[in-house]
Amino acid sequence: MGNFGRQPNFGKFGGRHMTCAGALSADWLRSIGIGARQLPTSNITLCDQFVLIGSGLIWNVYFAVIALSAGFFLAMALALGKDAASPWLRKPCAWFIFIFRGSPLFIQFFFGYFLFINIRGAFPGLGVLTSAGVGATIVLFLNTSAYSGEIFHGALRSIPKGDLEAADAFGLSGWGRFRRIIWPTMLRLGWPAYTNEAIFLFHATTLVFFSGFPAVQQSGDALYYARYFADRTFNPFVPYPILAGYFILLTLVIIGIFGLINRRLNRHLPQEVRPRIRYRPQVIR
Amino acid sequence: MKKLIITTAALALLGGAAAAQDVVRMGTEGAYPPWNFINDNGEVDGFERELGDELCERAGLTCEWVVNDWDTIIPNLVSGNFDVIIAGMSVTEARAEVIAFSTEYYPPTPSAYVGLTPDADINGVVAAQVATIQAGFIAESDATLLEFSTPDETVAAVRSGEADVVFADFDYLLPLVEASGGELSFVGDRVPLGGGVALGLRQSDVDLLEAFNTAIASVAEDGTLAELQARWFAEDSVQ
Amino acid sequence: MFGFCTDPASLDSTRWMLCYLTTPKHMNLYYAFGTVLLLLAITAPVSLAFGFGGAILARSRIAPLSWLGKGYIAIVRGVPDIAFFLFFVIALDQAFEWVLHQIRCPDWDQPIRQGSDFIVCAAAKLPQNNAPQYVHDTYAFLVAVLTFSIVFGAFAGNVLFGAMRAVPRAQIETAEAYGMTQGQVFRRIIVPQMWVYALPGLSNLWMVLIKATPLLFLLGIRDIVFWARELGATQTPRFTAFPHGDWRMWYFLFLLVFYLAFTRVSEVVLERIMRRLSHGQATAAGEAQRRAAA
């Protein structure tokens, strides 16, 4: 803060970029390696911080979107598997969920990276696993599958008995019964908790470069750049609140998107029943 | 002795301005041998521990040792959570804008590359610790920079083949190369980076800076400093 | 620790390991487990209190208070905990010292911010510079507890806010019909009833809290992750009597087992609490218990 005063007056515009627009056009894709190779090292402006931290969000969104959309399907499989009658199916699913829900993501990243390094040693062709873009996404995918699997498993077990009886009465069975009755109800009941899970997973993406996977050529996520600026300016009170602001905005976007889906899932219910569904889920992560 | 403790306690209660300097808190990282590390007894040890204790004694100060993460060591100093940074910190222009540096107690130290073979490619994939001058140097070169959060991970990356070489402080790498039994070796020439190493203090602590500068001059003069350097560092690390 | 540990290089592997695992440095790791458990034990009730406060504010009929409560819950929940931890501790510490400075040193004529320095009078320093190390450690621990509590309080607030609204409307109307005031309804009906609705969310929060403890080292606490990394890192014979290679994997495996076991124990305990809380409640689980007993 105070040290800005000691810099010459032209310092504000004498850095890498003349203007904010210049910073934006030069660096908004920096986190994926497009644009100026050098990060700003001196005369760092607020613009630099806003643009680069924002650029890093590309990684956070990428991790979250891939892990969540792939994890959704594995979560369904795990939820059904944990509910299966056969212990050969039930036990592995239950253990998978327990291990990933029972240990910190921090440690999962450590072991994931360690495992990928060893795989790379044995099969050099799979070396891409050790990169954050692939390896960390796999760990996040497994992690969110376990959490979502538990959420949907809880939802599956709280499907009203009457719904299932009605399905039987209509002569539905097997796939038809699952697709038309069980699956939509499970989704509807688990959705609020799943929204929370999506938010948590999005936040958890900041851990990838923080401890776990190396950053290549200074291409990292939003937290990576926030730390970079905190280190360069010795002032944590600017970059971290910027980061926080971005995350609050994107969290609102997630809530918005998931809320729209929730409305669609509940569109057949009478108006006054809808809000109550919010408090049904047994699992709010 | 007892009397002294009682006086100190009384002063602490009064909390006058004079009492503030009675105990000087020395902030270090504790993870950077031979500069500073935590020994088997769980205490701060290393070149800077011995030097720091000697400086405090000569300046007539009581010193306490505090371990702080490298990332937040400067914000914590300026915020007043300890009074001195003694953590192998090189003098740089950017740091000097924010904190005051004492007289240097160690000349600029070279950085070096270490790989699995002496002819490893230093322009290939280079591992370095995030937020170090070494990482900054590689970022500006043609090599591909791979940043890890701890120094240990950078060396592990070379062992696993993830990186061709690691680029770090020579004095940090030397004991690792020596202990590796030929697995690791230095690659290429050493690169001089950064300024000398000095204590970091708050810019407003003028008196304390003066006291430490006098003490450093005194240890340099009577050969104590040279003796400590010789004991903790390899002979040829000073260029 | 043991008499034969004076020359570790000469020992056979069992004794070497025994000596290695009992060095004072390792004791720090074992103490750190205590620190983590203590943090959890204090943070859980404190963040529940924060959450309760936040939920009450959010329910308030006075708009600014309601915004305050809702803002706290929404903003803190919207920020990744790491980002919060990275700057909040210093901010909190400075805020305390600033307040103390205003109280204890009203005559101070120098600016608090001088250049980059944050300088308060000696009497406002937290803790006092001359205080013994354990006071500094305790203070750092308490600031960490407070930071954790503020973060998790926002999540707890969200759960409790939902739970308060989940108490069946009919019960509240009945209470009002009996002539209870707003405060009485809240104290006698809503608060006792809400726990059964809040518990699933709170149990989950507890699980998340357990798994957030590896971030303690960001708050300046030397926790189990700090020591596991420190002890597991390659040790060269120059600086230790117990040199070894990169053993981080084994230390992290140990942490993994600790976290899994702790999670399992928590699950069992929380399930019991849920069963007790459901007793006599107007929920499906309560109904099932009533039928089983009848």
Image: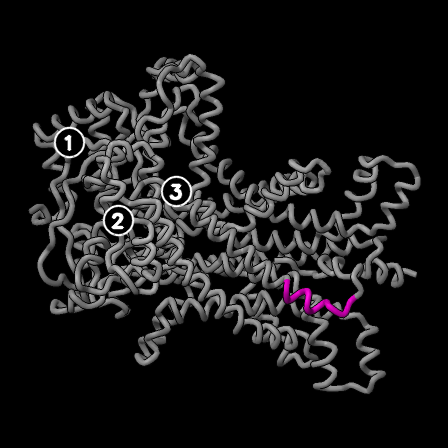
The disc numbered 3 marks a residue on which chain?
Answer: A
- Between B137 and A87, the one nearer to me in the picture: B137
Does dot 2 land on a helix, a strand or a loop?
loop
Does dot 1 land on a helix, a strand or a loop?
loop
Mark 3: few/some/many CA within 10 Å (<14, 14-19, 20+):
some
Same chain, labels 3 and 1: no
Q: At label 1, which amino acid type do we have?
A: Thr
Q: Quadrant of residue C1?
A: top left
Q: Residue at x 10, y 48 (%)?
A: B237
Q: Quadrant of the C terminus of chain C?
A: bottom right
Between the residue at mark 2 and the residue at mark 1, the CA separation in whole angstroms equals: 37 Å
| Residue B103 tag number | 1
Q: At label 3, which amino acid type do we have?
A: Val
Q: Quadrant of residue B93?
A: top left
Q: At label 2, which amino acid type do we have?
A: Met
Earlier in the chain: of badge 2 and badge 3, it is 2
Residue C292 % position (x, y): 87, 63
Between the residue at mark 2 and the residue at mark 3, the CA separation in whole angstroms equals: 21 Å
Q: Quadrant of residue B210?
A: top left
- Specify whether C54 is left or right of A32: right
**Secondary structure mostly seen in the magenta stretch:** helix
| Residue A18 tag number | 2
Residue A267: within the magenta? yes
- Specify whether C210 is left or right of B16: right
